[in-house]
Image (cartoon, rainbow, N blue to C red):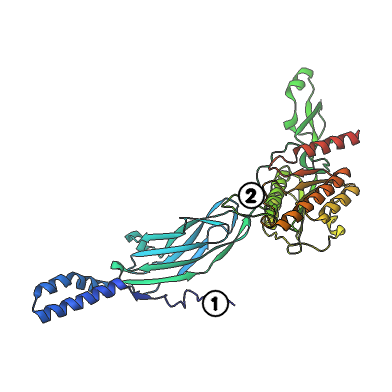
Amino acid sequence: MSPTRPSADTHPDNRWAVTHAHARAVLVSVVAGLGALLAQRPDILLMGAPLAMIALWSVLTRPATVPSTRLVVTDSRLQEGQWGRAVVGVETASNTELVSTSLARGPNMETFPKHGARLHLLTDEDRERPELHLFTRIKAGRWGVRRVGPGLVGATSPWGAFRWGPVPLDDLRIRVLPDPATFNTGAPAPHPLGLVGLHRSRFPGDGSEFNTIRPFQWGDRLKRIHWARSLRTNELHVTSSYADQDTHVAIIVDAHYDLGVSDAAEGLSSTLDYSVRAAAAIAEHFLHQGDRVSLQVLSARTPLHLPPGSGRRQSRRLLDALSQVQAHPQEEIDPRRLRRGLGPGALVVMISAMVAPGPLAQAALLSRSGLQVVVIDSLVDDVQPPGERDDIARLGWRIRLMERDAEVRRVRGEGVPVVPWRGPGSLDQVLRMLSRHRQGAGR
């Protein structure tokens, strides 16, 4: 069991203590006075007089109160690569000259300055404020719950005679959301159903895509009057449009395993990094179009299920859910849980490294039930394989990759597209194929 760290109020350094500089000044002054007295040398007394005056002035200006401190962050939620600020608040005590802080870096966190150290020489304007704020910039390199701190804070009196601290500051936890990179697919979703989104319907209605020009009817909006046609025919005509529709996009994230190394400083990403960021990018794209998006996470540690929704609120809920994902294998996948809330016309996007056969088998079952299913492969080329220094592990990994290729071929043979994740635009070709298949079936 690790020892318990004392709080700032009970810490032994939470007081104004004599520094070595002040002790040396007092000692030199006393020695100079005794030497001048014993040797009958006034010049020795004059040599020690400046240090004696400094020591006396330091005692008279010793701070009388111990300042209180706190550590806060300006944003409790950050996105990957976004800079935030950690603020150390120090109560302004009388006769304080210099305040210093130091903030430790947690895993996958960066600070500016690099070592999180700040020095601030107090001015007359600072002493008039009730609290002094020292800022340290922080940046998270990976999604998840990240640690800011712990930190240390200290102060000195004039001439460096007395010091306070350093006293500890407890660390804080912030939630880092995955970065939803711009997903630039222009392909429509294959099954628009509800009258909410931006996909064109086959039926006339209130939308944004032009259909035809027809005579005015009671109930038509005045802004839709086509004045050129109306003036030529001496009869009011209006423009009609196709109804805008939406679709239900169900995102399933396979978080059974996390392969590779995740190191933001080195630019390395694991399969779970790619899976979470791909899910965030795809969800952001379809939510921006007005579609309904749901989320399921296959993990024994974080079995998340987010019902379908749309809008900015759903985007925030989905990013919050993705930031909590932790890899852990499941013994068995319940197909009824995967089918929960998936009605006819839903588009299922499964994101998986496909190192376990279970998710691929479930994707094939969903496809057989009549749903459109797309599988995104998050095991990209730059993911470092496990056990790269062990010959037996490398051999086992090559065998598993051969089995994986055979499983992918079988799934593709059943009509399920498998697309490697190559950043924004990875699904563009597949969604166009599904849309053409949908239109062909409708004829």
* Label 2 element class: loop
Q: Percent x, y for residue 72?
A: 52, 63
The residue type indicated by label 2 comes to Asp
Q: Nearer the viewer, residue 396 or 381?
A: 396
Between disc 2 and disc 1, whose residue precedes? 1
- Looking at the image, which residue is at 28% across and 67% down? 159
Q: Quadrant of residue 31?
A: bottom left
Q: Is residue 133 left or right of residue 55?
A: right
Q: Residue furthest bottom?
A: 38
- Are the two marked residues, 2 and 1, in contact with CB atoms closer than 8 angstroms? no
Check the image and report above or below for 239 versus 117: above
- Residue 67 shows in this picture: no
- The amino acid sitting under disc 1 is Thr
Q: Within 10 angstroms of label 2, few (less than 14), some, or many (20 or more) residues? A: many
Question: Residue reaching furthest front?
Answer: 391
Question: Percent x, y for residue 309?
Answer: 75, 51
Residue 262 locus on image (x, y percent)? 63, 55
Tell me, for residue 4, which label it has, or none.
1
Please name the residue shown 90% across and 47% down the image: 370
Q: Which mark is residue 93?
A: none
In the rendered structure, the answer to whether residue 158 lies left or right of residue 352 reads left
Query: Could you tell me which quadrant the N terminus lies in?
Result: bottom right
Residue 81 seen:
yes
- For the residues labelled 2 and 1, the Cα–Cα distance comes to 36 Å
Q: Quadrant of the C terminus?
A: top right
The residue labelled by disc 2 is 179
Element type at marker 1?
A: loop
**What residue do we see at 79% from left, 52% from top?**
399
Q: Position of residue 136 (x, y in %)?
A: 47, 57
